[in-house]
Image: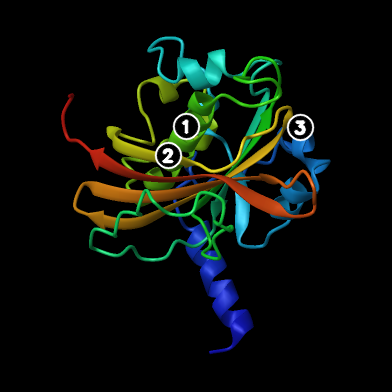
Amino acid sequence: MNRSYEHTKKEKMVDVKPPSIMNAPLTEEASLDSFRSHPHANRLLNHPEYYPIRTWSRLPKPSTGEDGYFAGTLATSITIPHCLTLRRRWLPPLAAARPPWPSPTDDPVSSEPSALPPDIFMLLDLATPGVSGHPSTAHGGIIATCIDEAMSLAVTLYSPPPELVASDHKGSEEDQTPRGKLYTSQLDVRYKRPVAVPGLLIIRAKVVGRVGRKFWVRAQVLQADEENPDQLVVTTDAMAFWLQTTSTL
């Protein structure tokens, strides 16, 4: 098949989807400007297989209080002032089996960035002192929170409830949620290197298996190497089990 025709066909497949907050491209340049000055982030912004979308969990929802922690507490000038989500244009089919759980005895400093394309890239501008644990070092709980948020969006790409229209985000978003009733059942985080703050953090999240309402997700947290800033290193590795429910827990 001609490559140009195949590419056009894929683009049409994307275009015919109903507009949703999870597939509508983010066109507000102001939301992208904060990351243009970071070489690693700018490279991802220009990646042909990914495009920016609105980060649902960063939108305030006053009537329900949902996402108050990530959209409010962690959205200040001294915590995480800027956050951007990039999604993959075309999602591969998921393995219909439970993947192996990684061993906790793996070498904590030998991990390299995965070569597998993630479903979601989440870019975070970490500030200080609001996210610090040790001096100039992000608290591990903050890193786990960011991983959890990135994973939730990756799972949402494979389990969309009725579409939430992107242009209607001022009204109906508090009555609907693109994530539906998704819950983290288990989150296993392996801290390999300290996360320096202030600085850019990149999270790769990928759903690696699904059996019915059960999802397995892998994530890596990347940051520029202090000795070689052109190189990204893995600071944190994570595996999670997510469950989609049909009723209130």
- The answer for how far apart the CA atoms under marks 3 and 1 are is 27 Å
Q: Amino acid at mark 2?
A: Val
Whether pointer 2 and pointer 1 mark residues with C-beta atoms closer than 8 Å, the reply is: yes
Q: Residue 180: x and y, percent?
A: 31, 34
Does the image show residue 212?
A: yes
Does the image show residue 157?
A: no
| Picture disc at residue 30 | 3
Label 2: which secondary element: strand
Crowding near pointer 2: few (<14 within 10 Å), some, many (20+)? some
Whether pointer 3 and pointer 2 mark residues with C-beta atoms closer than 8 Å, the reply is: no
Residue that numbered label 1 is attached to? 144
**Direction top: furthest residue:** 63
Q: Residue 86: x and y, percent?
A: 59, 47
Task: Nearest to the eye among marks 2 and 1: give it.
Answer: 2
Crowding near pointer 1: few (<14 within 10 Å), some, many (20+)? many
Position of residue 14 relative to residue 203, above or below, is below
Position of residue 70 relative to residue 24, above or below, is above
Pick the residue in front: 108 or 237.
Answer: 108
